[in-house]
């Protein structure tokens, strides 16, 4: 479906400087400040975006509130809202390649993944929630005959959405689609290093017929724009994907302002557990490698800790290293690359420090561990496998968010569960076993929001994604995500 001859003309296309998207049009920052956009492919700047301020956030929140209150979207019939969101899904699909290439120039994800996991997945999200929105019913309570208890599901009002750079379109759509489907207005703040594709989505939404002011995008630094959005007295719900440190700040901002509900999807240190009875260890090695190395490990659910049963440990590690070494890392817009670029120089340097720290703590680097393709000017790292990692080591406890796998042996089921749960995180996990009873015991015992069995990754829109422990609260995806964007309102009617 993807074809290099269609990608190449887009890779150097000039991108005009972008403003915020407020009230249906692109506007510059009020103080005219801008930020350079660097491509991780070659380290070069290729356009500029607006660097927002609290005043810009205020302007966007005011537009969103105004749009919500006058009912131009919140009061539209479900059928009318559905039509617009389905049209948006169509437009995203029609522009999928352009959106994917734009996003890759901004964030470095390999194009084959960006095309599916970013552009097509965003279209699928808008379609899913468009289809769902006229099937959401309220409730009639089982009351005495002389009263009627109604439970309405009312849109919350203005939603603030703060999203990261690793999958801006996919994660952005996980939040925008249910928020808009339920009739809310939104102010979206993309990561300052991955704003371009989301700005384009806002334009496409307008083209699809979304009324002005319903979806606004304010770009710029997290500590300025994100903070102002989270502190706003006029934002009713905040939805976020990003780091634990920022998540904690958002809860503080909520407490300091209007107690807005915050739904946080934070980091992970997800254990991928391979038992000696797994049916196909060669497949397990291949899928486990993809489960940590795709998008250069910049995936919140990445299987970044590999726990392998002692008696198969050495053979499995050898197979896994072979898989890691066979992965072609390179220009993410070249279809022959299986792994693209690390998002930024700061990220790359942080990954290399994690490797150094792991070695200092006694782990062994079995493959990778270094920057590669430096002559391109871009940021690339060889898929890295560290063995002999203890559960207390830094690399087993802290999220690297890069192509670095920490491997530890375990003795038996109880040992695997103990090591798997020995972190502050609880986002994802994986279990490889042919024993159905063991699979179900592990599903119950491992504390995580999602657990893969005999595979890793790939859970689609039909199932929720959210963390337990310090990986967050609330859920993206599935019909459960709709709960984030509605208030339950009771009407108690005396008959
Ligand atoms: P990451 O480490 O993945 O970049 P961050 O939590 O720093 O994770 O970033 C995720 C999103 O949060 C980005 O859009 C970023 O701009 C935003 N952000 C960063 N700092 C703050 C902050 N203090 N307040 C609100 N948003 C922030």
Image: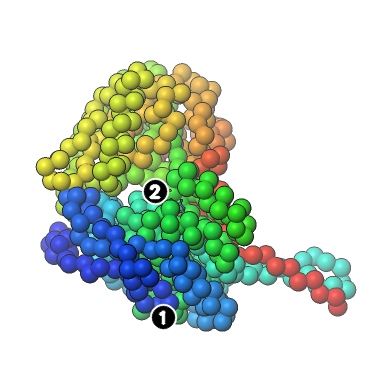
Q: Are marks 1 and 2 in contact (CB under 8 Å)?
A: no
Of mark 1 and mark 2, the one earlier in the sequence is 1
Tag 1: Cα neighbours inside 10 Å, few (<14), some, or many (≥20)? some
Q: Is residue 63 left or right of residue 156?
A: left
| 57 to 113, vertically: above or below | below
Depth check: 427 or 360 in front?
Answer: 360
Quadrant showing the C terminus:
bottom right
* Circle nearer the viewer, 1 or 2: 1
- Residue drawn at the location 61% of the way across and 53% of the way down: 255
Residue 19: x percent and y percent?
A: 32, 69
Q: Is residue 278 left or right of residue 150?
A: left
Residue carrying label 2: 458
Q: Quadrant of residue 387?
A: top left
Q: Is residue 250 visible?
A: yes
Q: Quadrant of residue 319?
A: top left
Residue 414 tag number = none
- Residue drawn at the location 85% of the way across and 75% of the way down: 494
Residue carrying label 1: 209
Pick out the residue farthest to the front.
31
Q: Is residue 434 left or right of residue 106?
A: right
**Ligand 1 lies under 8 Å from the Cβ of mark 1:** no
């Amino acid at each position: 479906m993807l074809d290099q001859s269609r990608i190449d003309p887009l890779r150097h296309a000039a991108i005009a400087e972008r403003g915020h998207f407020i009230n249906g049009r692109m506007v510059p920052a009020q103080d005219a400040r801008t930020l350079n956009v660097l491509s991780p492919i070659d380290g070069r700047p290729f356009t500029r975006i607006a660097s927002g301020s609290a005043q810009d956030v205020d302007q966007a929140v005011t537009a969103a509130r105004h749009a919500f209150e006058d009912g131009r979207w919140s009061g539209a019939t479900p059928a009318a809202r559905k039509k617009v969101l389905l049209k948006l899904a169509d437009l995203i699909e029609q522009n999928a390649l352009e959106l994917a290439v734009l996003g890759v120039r901004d964030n470095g994800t390999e194009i084959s993944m960006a095309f599916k996991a970013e552009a097509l997945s965003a279209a699928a999200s808008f379609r899913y929630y468009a289809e769902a929105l006229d099937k959401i019913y309220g409730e009639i309570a089982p009351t005495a005959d002389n009263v009627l208890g109604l439970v309405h599901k009312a849109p919350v009002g203005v939603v603030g959405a703060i999203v990261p750079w690793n999958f801006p379109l996919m994660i952005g759509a996980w939040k925008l689609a249910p928020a808009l489907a339920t009739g809310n207005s939104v102010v979206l703040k993309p990561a300052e290093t991955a704003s371009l594709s989301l700005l384009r989505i806002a334009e496409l939404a307008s083209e699809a017929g979304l009324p002005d002011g319903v979806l606004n995008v304010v770009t710029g630094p997290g500590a300025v724009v994100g903070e102002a959005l989270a502190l706003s007295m006029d934002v009713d719900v905040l939805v976020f994907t990003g780091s634990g440190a920022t998540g904690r700040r958002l809860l503080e901002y909520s407490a300091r302002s209007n107690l807005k509900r915050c739904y946080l999807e934070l980091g992970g240190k997800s254990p991928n557990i391979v038992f000696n009875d797994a049916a196909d260890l060669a497949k397990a090695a291949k899928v486990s490698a993809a489960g940590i190395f795709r998008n250069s490990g910049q995936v919140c659910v990445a299987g970044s800790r590999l726990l392998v049963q002692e008696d198969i440990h050495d053979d499995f590690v050898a197979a896994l290293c072979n898989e890691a070494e066979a992965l072609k890392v390179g220009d993410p817009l070249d279809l022959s690359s299986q792994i693209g670029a690390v998002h930024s120089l700061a990220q790359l340097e942080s990954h290399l420090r994690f490797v150094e720290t792991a070695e200092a703590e006694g782990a062994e680097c079995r493959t990778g561990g270094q920057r590669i393709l430096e002559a391109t000017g871009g940021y690339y790292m060889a898929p890295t496998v560290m063995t002999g990692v203890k559960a207390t080591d830094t690399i087993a406890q802290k999220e690297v968010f890069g192509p670095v796998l920490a491997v530890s042996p375990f003795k038996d089921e109880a040992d695997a569960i103990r090591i798997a749960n020995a972190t502050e995180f609880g986002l994802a996990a994986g279990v490889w076993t042919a024993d159905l009873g063991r699979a179900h015991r592990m599903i119950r015992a491992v504390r995580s929001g999602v657990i893969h069995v005999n595979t890793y990754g790939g859970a689609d829109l039909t199932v929720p994604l959210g963390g337990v422990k310090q990986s967050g609260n609330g859920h993206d995806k599935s019909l459960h995500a709709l709960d984030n964007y509605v208030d339950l309102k009771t009407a108690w009617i005396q008959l």
